[in-house]
Image (cartoon, grey):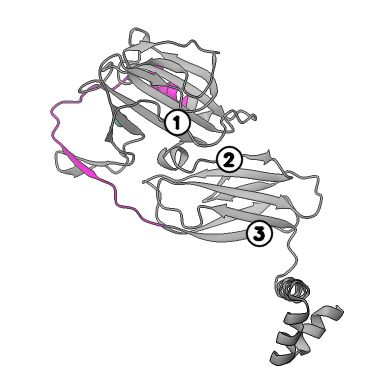
């Protein structure tokens, strides 16, 4: 306490004299004063809470990182828009939930609720709108609908929440070709806006047979082939990266892994093709976080620890 009041009562000239005497001492005392003021202003919280990105936009994955400051027995829960998200321990006595957002979400104010560690807390964030490219498609007839089998397999992949985290750092690029269609593209079919459609992944152009590699470590939990009913997706591989994060790779010409295999980042899993509903050889990579298709780009760039 004494240094604090000493600093606060110093005149400017006295402060400079003090500075000459001991720059480090003054700096230390000043920081102490600031820290104490913050403690006095902020109400006592049982949890440190960090939300990243601080300024999210549609398609982003929102990481909510919690650090309990009082020991508690109860695992924390994180809820947004009425959905509770799984929370997993991170290093350093921290916990994290990953909240997916998509182009179908309503932008604006969202309230993230955290409970189970001390007093429940509500934190408001603003989910920014984002303009996605638009395609106008002319279709005749019903098109290729896909089978019950492939949809149920893909749904099961999206719902997997393994407690372990297999990925480390930023995801790698799964194919070497240019991006031919980005995430989130919206469509009009015969002039009518498709409310529920958005491009649920990133497409990479590439020659037939060029390699497709795992962007991150994980367990192969889905191998689907055209002859088994994957008529829309084509030959497909699904990887569980752990903690509610999974990838799907579709339209493959070849599959080089089996269900149950554990793959490392950069490991070849198949080859680019045009199987299923594809206009030409390309790789579609879809990234799911807790059941929703999110923009893989933030996972490629800065990544999630
Ligand atoms: Zn695609």
> Is 36 rendered above or below residue 284?
below
Q: CA distance from mark 2 to mark 1?
A: 14 Å
Question: x%, y% of residue 141?
Answer: 15, 26
Q: Is residue 95 left or right of residue 59?
A: right
Using the rendered view, name the quadrant where residue 93 is placed: top right
Q: Which residues are magenta?
A: 128-156
| Residue 41 locus on image (x, y percent) | 71, 75
Query: Which disc number belongs to residue 305?
Result: 2
Say left or right for 88 vs 55. Answer: right
Q: Quadrant of the C terminus?
A: top right
Identity of the residue drawn at 76% across and 56% down: 118
Q: Secondary structure at mark 2?
A: loop
For label 3, the residue is: 121
Q: Position of residue 302 (x, y in %)?
A: 48, 43
- Identify the residue at horizontal 42%, vertical 25% (top origin): 248
Give the CA separation, mark 3 to mark 2.
24 Å
Contact flag, marks 3 and 2 (Cβ < 8 Å): no
Image depth: mark 3 or mark 2 in front: 2
Residue drawn at 36 percent across, 17 percent down: 211
The secondary structure type at the circle numbered 3 is: strand
Q: In the picture shown, does residue 119 fall above or below 195? A: below
Residue 166 position by quadrant: top right
Any part of residue 172 in sight? yes
Sort mark 1 into few (<14), some (14-19) or many (20+) by Cα contacts within 10 Å. Answer: some
The residue that label 1 is drawn on is 172
Query: 266 or 254, which is in the foreground?
Result: 266
Q: CA distance from mark 3 to mark 1?
A: 36 Å
Q: Residue at (44%, 33%) from the top-left corner?
A: 287
User: Do callouts 3 and 1 mark residues in contact (Cβ within 8 Å)?
Assistant: no
């Amino acid at each position: 306490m004494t240094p604090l009041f000493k600093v606060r009562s110093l005149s400017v000239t006295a402060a400079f004299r003090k500075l000459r005497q001991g720059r480090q001492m003054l700096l230390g005392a000043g920081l102490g004063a600031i820290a104490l003021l913050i403690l006095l202003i902020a109400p006592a919280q049982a949890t440190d809470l960090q939300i990243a990105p601080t300024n999210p936009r549609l398609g982003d994955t929102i990481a909510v990182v919690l650090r309990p400051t009082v020991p508690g027995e109860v695992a924390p829960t994180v809820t947004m828009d009425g959905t509770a998200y799984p929370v997993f321990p991170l290093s350093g006595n921290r916990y994290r939930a990953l909240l997916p957002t998509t182009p179908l979400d309503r932008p604006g104010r969202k309230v993230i609720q955290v409970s189970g560690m001390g007093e429940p807390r509500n934190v408001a964030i603003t989910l920014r709108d984002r303009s996605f490219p638009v395609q106008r498609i002319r279709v005749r007839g019903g098109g290729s609908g896909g089978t019950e089998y492939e949809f149920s397999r893909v749904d099961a992949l999206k719902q997997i929440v393994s407690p372990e985290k297999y990925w480390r750092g930023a995801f790698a690029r799964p194919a070497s070709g240019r991006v031919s269609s980005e995430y989130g593209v919206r469509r009009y079919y015969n002039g009518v806006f498709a409310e529920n459609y958005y491009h649920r992944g990133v497409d990479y152009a590439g020659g037939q047979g060029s390699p497709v590699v795992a962007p991150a470590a994980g367990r192969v939990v889905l191998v689907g082939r055209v002859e088994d009913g994957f008529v829309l997706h084509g030959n497909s591989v699904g990887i569980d990266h752990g903690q509610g994060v999974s990838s799907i790779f579709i339209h493959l010409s070849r599959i080089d892994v089996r269900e149950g295999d554990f793959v490392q980042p950069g490991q070849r899993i198949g080859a680019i093709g045009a199987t299923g509903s594809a206009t030409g050889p390309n790789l579609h990579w879809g990234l799911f976080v807790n059941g929703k298709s999110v923009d893989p780009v933030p996972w490629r760039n800065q990544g999630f620890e």
